[in-house]
Image: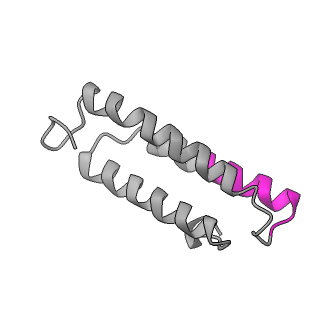
Amino acid sequence: MGKGLIWATAEDLARNRGRVLSLYRQILRSLNSPDLPLNLAARLAKKAEARAIFIVASEERSLHNIDDLIDAAHYSLSLLRKGEIPKYIQ
């Protein structure tokens, strides 16, 4: 992933910034899908939960944890695209 062995360097964080922002936008867009069984209030609540997860995760500096968070975001996005709600934001 990067040059740091355990902790992310500024270069590592800058390199992942675009990918993380893209995942964030895709997840928020997917929560608007009519395939999901959510009403407007539930959609807004799920978006707030996703936003909170990304805000808390933005403080992470461990390379392994950052990789795990990105993998979890990809997995959640794949579930949302299938019309399912991931368990950790249910």
For residue 27, above or below residue 25 = below
* Location of residue 74 in the rendering, given as x and y in whole percent from the top left corner: 46, 59
- 29 lies left or right of 60: right
**In terms of depth relative to the viewer, which is nearer, 37 or 63?**
37
Q: Residue at x 60, y 49 (%)?
A: 26
Seen in the picture, residue 30 relative to 3 is either above or below; the reply is below
Indicate the position of residue 14 as horizontal and vertical percent values. 35, 28
Residue 2 located left or right of residue 17 = left
Image position, residue 10 (x, y; %): 28, 25
Horizontal relation, residue 41 to residue 46: left or right:
right
**Does the magenta portion include 31?**
no
Give the image's coloring scheme: one colour
User: Is residue 71 positioned above or below 28 on the image?
Assistant: below
- The magenta span reads 38-51
Q: Residue at x 44, y 61 (%)?
A: 72
* 47 inside magenta stretch: yes
Residue 24 drawn at (x, y percent): 56, 45
The quarter of the displayed image where residue 1 is located: top left
Rendered residue at 66%/49% (across/down): 28
Name the residue at 54% across, 50% down: 53
Majority secondary structure of the magenta segment?
Answer: helix
The C terminus: image quadrant:
bottom right
